[in-house]
Amino acid sequence: MRCAQCGTENLPGARLCVQCGAPLPAEMEGASVAAVPPAPGRVAWQPADVGPAMPAVPVSVPRRFLVLRILSVIYKVFGGIVAAFTILGALGSCLVGVAGGAMTQELERQLGTPLPQAGGLIGGVAVGLFVLLYGGFIALTLYGAGEGIALFIAIEENTRSIAASGRR
Ligand SMILES: [Zn+2]
């Protein structure tokens, strides 16, 4: 049957238009409900499952806080990137420290005099540890901000769904 409001063709027996939600004129019961197969890729319209005053609000719920959702994902992604670079930086610092220490030792052996050990393995590890702590803190802060936003959205939606179910 055709919707008087928007002209969308609805399955027979439907009480509401699938397109605009307008109430459809009542039809003879069981006339040809089972005769028409559902369109491919579309679930058969079940009039019995849907109440007469189903609001269109739940459809729009996932779209709310879109910017905050994106921000939450961005924060988490950046947190992950910072964490990855932190680990790489710390490892690199240790490697540079080891390589630098080996170079210093080689230089000492060739010159025959001890050189000041400013860098070396211990210096590299110390820098690496500092990078790990500092970068880890930034990474956790970024990720935590993303989690906080996600938590806020979850709480807000929970509150709203409780309010909506109480209204019914
Ligand atoms: Zn319609």
Image (tube, grey):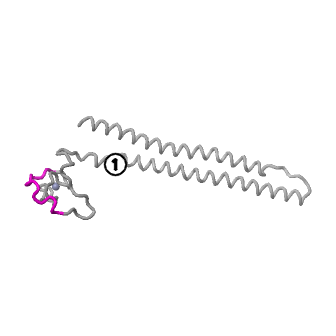
41 over 70 or under it: above or below: below
Task: Count the marks.
Answer: 1
Q: Which residue is drawn at 28% across and 49% down?
A: 59
Residue extending furthest toward the right = 112
Residue 30 part of the magenta-drawn span = yes
Asked which quadrant contains residue 43, the reply is bottom left
Q: Which residue is drawn at 53% across and 49% down?
A: 79
User: Hey, what amino acid is under mark 1?
Assistant: Pro
In the rendered image, residue 114, in percent from the top left (x then y), is placed at: 89, 52
Q: In this view, does 137 lie to the left or right of 168?
A: right
In the rendered image, residue 153, in percent from the top left (x then y), is placed at: 39, 42
In the rendered image, residue 106, in percent from the top left (x then y), is placed at: 85, 59
Q: In this view, does 167 lie to the left or right of 12?
A: right
Q: Name the residue under label 1.
A: 62
Q: Residue at x 35, y 39 (%)?
A: 158
Quadrant of the rendered image holding ligand 1: bottom left
Q: In this view, does 158 lie to the left or right of 126?
A: left
36 over 80 or under it: above or below: below
Mark 1 Cβ inside 8 Å of ligand 1: no
Q: Element at badge 1?
A: helix
Quadrant including the C terminus: top left
Asked which quadrant contains residue 11, the reply is bottom left
161 over 40 or under it: above or below: above
Residue extending furthest toward the bottom = 40
Asked which quadrant contains residue 35, the reply is bottom left
Of 112 and 51, nearer the camera is 51
Label 1: few (<14), some (14–19) or many (≥20) C-alpha neighbours in 10 Å = few
Residue 135 part of the magenta-drawn span = no
Q: Is the magenta stretch mostly helix, strand or loop?
A: loop
Of 8 and 120, nearer the camera is 8
Quadrant including the N terminus: bottom left
Q: What stretch is highlighted in magenta?
A: 22-36
